[in-house]
Image (cartoon, rainbow, N blue to C red):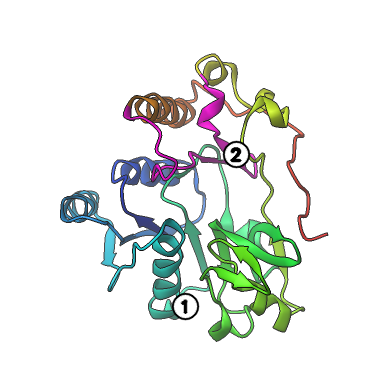
Amino acid sequence: MIKIYTYADKRPDFIPYQFKSLKHFLTDEFEYIVFNNATNSFNRWKINNLCNKLGIKVYPIKNPNHSNANIACAYPLQWSFHKIIRYQKENIAAILDSDMFLLKKFNIREYLDGFDIAGTKQIREKVKYLWNGILFFNLKTLPSIDYLNFMCGFIDGTATDVGGYLYYYFLKNPSVKVKNILHTSHIHSKNKNLNVLPKEILCRYDENFCFELYESAFLHYGRGSNWDKMSREFHKKKTSLAFDFIDGCIKSNIKLLRYKYIFDKDAWK
């Protein structure tokens, strides 16, 4: 069995959709676990209530820090990995953003086979690290696990976002086997990749939604916390389309297309 962890805050409504997409499409035997990182008491209650109804284990983040959007994401990841995730008995662990949904059959154990860690490679000037939104770990083979640092900040004058301090880990562990999780980046005309969406979704798609697909299997809603201050109506339409996309794939009314588009084969090179 593998364990899949996510972090819930401002969008409790994502939990049942992420859970049911994993139950339908993930071919690994798995346990789904939620870390409650809510900023207010109502959302904390709602997340706990939803998880209890769905039979999902939920942990509260101790002393959450919401001083800015990056810290609000980085701190619970760092705390939970070193307090809970790294000590699990199973070898394979996965971390998913709360707005990451599975749309077709996928096996994490097979995907990670032969690698210590899988994630989407990021680079800021010379600083190489992994994006936090989708990460797979082989906890049995991953070296120097004590030194994994998912925090953010400045490295030699370069600003990094969540996971930036992984740069130091990879610098000290050059032999670690990293699999690059490929993606479309934002699905937008500027990236010339609108054709990756099924016609049933494309006909209702607003380019400003900026959906992403990872490994032609995971839908990333993106900006679900609304850090960019979009309107309520905007997120209502975006959420409706995302949930219809997920339901359509589960019911086989919508099928993901086979496409060759890759935004960046290896950002570290």
Find residue 63 and report its horizontal and vertical position in percent: 28, 73
| 102 or 160: nearer the viewer | 160
For this orientation, the residue located farthest to the front is: 157
Is residue 90 a member of the stretch shown in magenta? Answer: no
- Could you tell which of marks 2 and 1 lies nearer the N-terminus? 1
Q: Is residue 92 visible?
A: yes
Specify the amino acid type for callout 2: Leu
**Image point (64%, 73%), residue name:** 155
Looking at the image, residue 37 sits to the left or right of residue 258; the answer is left
Give residue 209's mark.
Answer: none
Q: Picture quarter containing residue 3?
A: bottom left
In the image, the segment drawn in magenta is 205-232
Judging by the rendered image, the residue that carries numbered circle 1 is: 86
Is residue 214 a member of the stretch shown in magenta? Answer: yes
What secondary structure predominates along the stretch shown in magenta? loop
CA gap between label 2 and label 1 equals 28 Å
Specify the amino acid type for callout 1: Arg
Q: Picture quarter containing residue 258?
A: top right
Q: How many marks?
A: 2
Looking at the image, residue 21 sits to the left or right of residue 188; the answer is left
